Image (cartoon, helix red, strand yellow):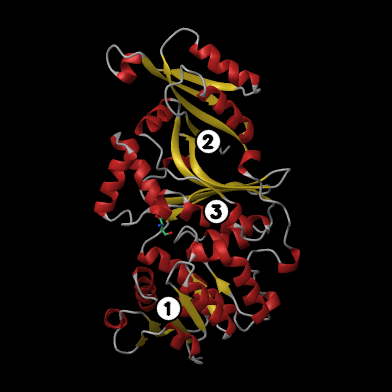
């Protein structure tokens, strides 16, 4: 049988990896897929570079629409990124009856509902394993491997850039700005790292996982997003002293009131496996009612790890494209007419525990006032740590850090308590609040 024909839109890092891995492993992939998978056409603005990657036998053009319009192409792989032209091209490819593979988490987190609806109407597949956690097959695990389960929660380190920065901050005792510059110099962080360090990239991925886990529409606009830019090395140090590590987690959780969907730095017990995921690696924990806790670990980015996910999608489509559309795995795991209308909760209704760091005057009665405010809001303290003033501010210092770990409370209640504590004249700097997840 003739090989299935694939057109690539964009051949940068992931596209090159896809081409190389497909070539290298073509015999095994063919034995698995049931027929060959061939990259027949590539669109890239830099045609000379693209041609040098794929050689003379593959047609290279600078117009993505020429790939979409080619009747021989069965699958279009979108590797352009962003929500602009990529969105138009994906919609046009679907309209042209092509199956689509994409690594574009931003596009799916924001416009997924429209894209999946168009694909279902047209009877084509949109596959996106590479969009979440790169080479880790977490979409496959959630959508198929864990299909027996009522998923309770997912918590993932799903941004390698920020995990690298946090690992360096902890190892070397350096502050965020210093480590970011070094990460950029080494190529671990982009020249414009905004989406990574502000938590947006991780929130895109958490949004996609949330939709698949709970059968809700993708709703990035409802996600709470907080990055790592305000973390100090001192917080990582205090967390360590209390038995925790700080990780940027993408979290989505089922509660009695609705779905939590949030990305923010979190204290995680140092003894958890996920707390020991270092450098640019990714890991996702999934809690299902039947299976219990599962953990998926691997490379979340990079040429061949991401290509591994793209090619898995190509194989899936190759196996299934002649099947009745109703027999295929639904895009978001649940049948389109069986989606849930569970609300995504505002952050003020989220329940979690907290790490608070207060820079306070080292004088009588300060702790009593602070703990009095927490007690008045019915916030229970789990642990407290106060360093000697000399250690914090140098010899003769009259200031110190007070670190408080709380039990679970509602975020809105914690906001009110922080506002009251911040108003105390003996609280000398903005209070640092980091959420804490036991992940038990
Ligand atoms: N920028 C992402 C990261 C990789 O740092 O993990 C692509 O999703």
- Closer to the camera in the image, 62 or 22: 62
Q: CA distance from mark 3 to mark 2?
A: 17 Å
Q: Which mark is residue 9?
A: 1
Figure check: 388 above or below 37: above
Image quarter where the C terminus lies is top right
* Vertical side of 96 occupied by 81: above or below: above
Report the side of 390 relative to 117 (left or right): left
Q: Nearer the viewer, residue 38 or 93?
A: 93
Between 125 and 349, which is closer to the camera in this rendering? 349
In the rendered view, does 332 fall on the left or right side of 47? right
Q: Give ligand 1's quarter of the image.
A: bottom left
Of the residues under marks 3 and 1, which one precedes in the sequence?
A: 1
The residue under the point 36% across, 30% down is: 234
Of the residues under marks 1 and 2, which one precedes in the sequence?
1
Task: Look at the numbered discs 1 and 2 and tell me whether their residues touch, using CB distance below 8 Å.
Answer: no
Q: Which residue is mark 3?
A: 206
The numbered disc on residue 435 is: 2
């Amino acid at each position: 049988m003739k090989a299935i024909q694939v057109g690539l839109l964009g051949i940068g890092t992931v596209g090159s990896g896809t081409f190389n891995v497909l070539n290298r492993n073509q015999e095994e992939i063919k034995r698995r897929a049931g027929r060959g998978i061939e990259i027949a056409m590539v669109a890239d603005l830099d045609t000379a570079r693209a041609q040098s990657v794929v050689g003379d036998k593959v047609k290279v053009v600078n117009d993505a629409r020429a790939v979409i319009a080619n009747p021989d192409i069965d699958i279009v792989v979108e590797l352009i990124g962003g929500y602009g032209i990529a969105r138009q091209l994906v919609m046009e490819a679907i309209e042209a009856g092509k199956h689509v593979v994409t690594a574009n988490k931003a596009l799916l987190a924001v416009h997924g509902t429209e894209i999946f609806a168009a694909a279902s109407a047209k009877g084509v597949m949109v596959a996106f394993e590479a969009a979440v956690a790169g080479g880790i097959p977490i979409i496959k695990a959630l959508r198929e491997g864990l299909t027996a389960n009522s998923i309770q929660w997912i918590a993932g380190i799903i941004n390698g850039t920020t995990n690298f920065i946090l690992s360096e901050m902890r190892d070397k005792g350096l502050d965020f700005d210093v480590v970011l510059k070094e990460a950029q110099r080494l190529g671990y962080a982009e020249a414009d790292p905004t989406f990574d360090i502000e938590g947006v990239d991780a929130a895109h991925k958490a949004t996609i996982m949330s939709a698949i886990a709970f059968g809700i529409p993708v709703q990035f606009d409802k996600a709470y997003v907080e990055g790592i830019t305000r973390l100090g090395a001192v917080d990582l140090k205090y967390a360590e002293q209390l038995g925790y590590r700080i990780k940027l987690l993408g979290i989505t959780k089922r509660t009695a009131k609705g779905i939590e969907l949030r990305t923010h730095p979190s204290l995680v017990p140092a003894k958890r496996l996920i707390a020991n995921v270092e450098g640019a690696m990714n890991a996702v924990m999934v809690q299902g009612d039947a299976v219990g806790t599962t953990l998926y670990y691997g490379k979340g980015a990079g040429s061949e790890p991401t290509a591994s996910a793209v090619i898995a999608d190509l194989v899936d489509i190759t196996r299934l494209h002649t099947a009745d559309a109703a027999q295929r795995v639904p895009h978001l795991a649940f049948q389109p007419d069986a989606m849930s209308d569970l609300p995504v909760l505002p952050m003020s209704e989220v329940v979690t525990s907290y790490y608070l760091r207060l820079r306070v005057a080292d004088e009588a009665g300060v702790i009593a006032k602070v703990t009095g405010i927490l007690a008045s809001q019915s916030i229970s303290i789990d642990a407290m740590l106060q360093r000697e003033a000399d250690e914090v501010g140098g010899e003769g210092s009259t200031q110190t850090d007070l670190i408080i770990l709380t039990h679970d409370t509602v975020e809105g209640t914690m906001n009110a308590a922080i506002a009251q504590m911040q108003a105390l004249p003996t609280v000398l700097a903005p209070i640092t609040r980091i959420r804490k997840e036991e992940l038990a």
